[in-house]
Amino acid sequence: MKTLWKILISAGMAMSLAACAGSAAASASPSPSASSAPAMDENTALAAYKTASTELEKFYQMKYSIDGKDSVEPAGGGTFYRVKDYGTLSELKDHLMQYVTADCADSILSQWASVYIENDGKLYMLGADTPVDETKGEESDAAAKVSDTEYKITATVQIINPDDNNKVTGSKDFEFPYVLQDGEWRFQEFPKIR
């Protein structure tokens, strides 16, 4: 009987290793060519940026619906309220990944780990307003094709002096690489502007 179990366990391990090797080989395959990807041009890339910008600003500005009656106060301090829009951090990440790559979503969530937390399987958000950078004024956007699998969006934002009637004192460029990955166009980076 022990010999039969050893054979079954060995067979199961071999099948698992073969399956992992197959999935590693599949994930190591090159990304699809531009010919199999959704059509892309500068205008489409700019439209995607505008949509992603709207959604990411909700995240950065903490503009999700909350349940004011369901709160937690972790040891680190602050009051966090349950987010109604997404049940878990995983659901929030899935939402972000409609616009950004998985690595970008992980990076954003890591940077905002003191604002969005999961407690008892529920997503909570810090109950405080995110300050808006009042030194950032109007924005103009441009798209440029880098290759068949990458576009670059450049957002040029006016730098203003709020203490001097919002006088424009300069500008700053923010870059958003838009890449074809696993057959989908996603932003590889999405910095917070305001």
Image (spheres, rainbow, N blue to C red):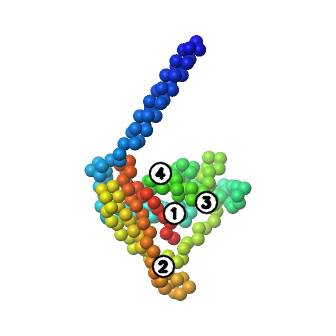
Does label 4 or label 1 sit earlier along the sequence?
1
Q: Which residue is mark 1?
A: 58
Element under disc 4: helix
Give the class, few, some or many, for how many residues have Cα within 10 Å of label 1's Cα (few <14, many ≥20).
Answer: few
Give the class, few, some or many, for how many residues have Cα within 10 Å of label 4's Cα (few <14, many ≥20).
Answer: some
Q: Which residue is mark 4?
A: 102
Looking at the image, which residue is at 46% across and 62% down?
A: 190
Does label 2 or label 1 sit earlier along the sequence?
1
Q: Nearer the viewer, mark 4 or mark 1?
A: 4
Element under disc 1: helix
Element under disc 2: strand
Q: CA distance from mark 4 to mark 2?
A: 31 Å
Q: Which residue is mark 2?
A: 159
Looking at the image, which residue is at 35% across and 45% down?
A: 30
Q: Nearer the viewer, mark 3 or mark 4?
A: 4
Residue 52 coordinates in the image, percent (x, y): 43, 61
Q: Which residue is mark 3?
A: 115
Q: Nearer the viewer, mark 3 or mark 2?
A: 2
In the image, 174 versus 60, the foreground residue is 174
Above or below residue 76? Residue 166 is: below
What amino acid is labelled 1 in the image? Lys
What amino acid is labelled 4 in the image? Ala
Q: CA distance from mark 3 to mark 2?
A: 27 Å
What amino acid is labelled 2 in the image? Ile
Residue 44 appears in the rendering = no
